[in-house]
Amino acid sequence: MSNPIFDKTPSLSYLGLPQSYEPSPENDPIAFLRKHLLQLPPHLLMSYTHITTPNQRTTIAAIRNRRLHYANKNPPDLQFNYARITWPGLWQGQERLVGQDGDDERAWVQSEFLKGKKKFVGNLGNLLATYEEERLSECIRTLGRRRATTDTDFVPEEDSDSDSDPHPQEKETEEEAKASFERLIREFFVYGRLEVSDDRCCGIEITVH
């Protein structure tokens, strides 16, 4: 389904600006929002999700600060348990995903589905667990490939002596790894690099002060 066609007229009319106004909300929406973000009402700001991305909008200081303010509240959707399932390709401990969620499916069938009546349940628990493991494995592979092709911000310089590093880094504990992962998720969220609902992003950008 194609996005709704963006119409610059409502924004310009609301601000009392001519159709020829520059920067144009249609041709240069980020520059327009930098000047008029705080003057536009939420229902008009929502329309800019059709012609901009979260990453583009976070170049605007006011929007980036609102997203940072939201992230600093440590909301549940940016915490480890939720984030590791929603964005498994960013979690280095990927091997802990598959199996654990399959166990959750088995437990649900045994305790909740038809109150665990065995003659109805049969092997449904194992079947659901298998489906969940396959789904997570495919999700991990897909996001892992995407991360490998897009995360090119840093390319390490080759070092012929790398095999004899006199100061090897200590391996993170599980708690340290989880904390690092949550920091990464918050950073990606603030800078619009997470795959999340655009409407949700814009809602945070509009309402968080």
Image: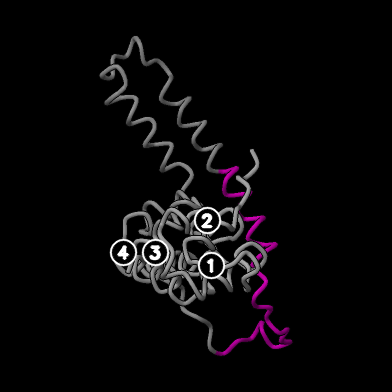
Mark toward the start of the polypeptide (3 vs 4): 4
Q: Which element carries disc 2, helix, strand or loop?
A: helix
Residue 179 in picture, x, y percent from top left: 37, 68
Q: Which mark is residue 57?
A: 1
Amino acid carrying label 4: it is: Asn
Given contact means CB atoms under 8 Å apart, are the residues at marks 1 and 3 in contact? no
Q: Nearer the viewer, mark 3 or mark 2?
A: 2
Please indicate whether residue 131 sits to the left or right of residue 172 in the image: right
Quadrant for the N terminus in the image: top right
**Would you call the spot at circle 2 few (<14 residues within 10 Å), some (14-19), or many (20 or more)?**
few
Camera-nearest label, 2 or 1: 2
Which class describes the residues within 10 Å of circle 4: few (<14), some (14-19), or many (20+)? few
Residue denoted by label 2: 10
User: Does 111 appear above or below 165?
Assistant: above
The answer to which quarter of the image holds residue 107 is top left
- Look at the image and say whether residue 149 sits in the magenta stretch: yes
Q: Residues within 10 Å of mark 1 (few under 14, many from 20)?
A: many
Q: Earlier in the sequence, mark 4 or mark 1?
A: 1
Q: Which percent across, then down, holds residue 169?
A: 50, 81
Q: Label 1, secondary structure: give it.
A: helix
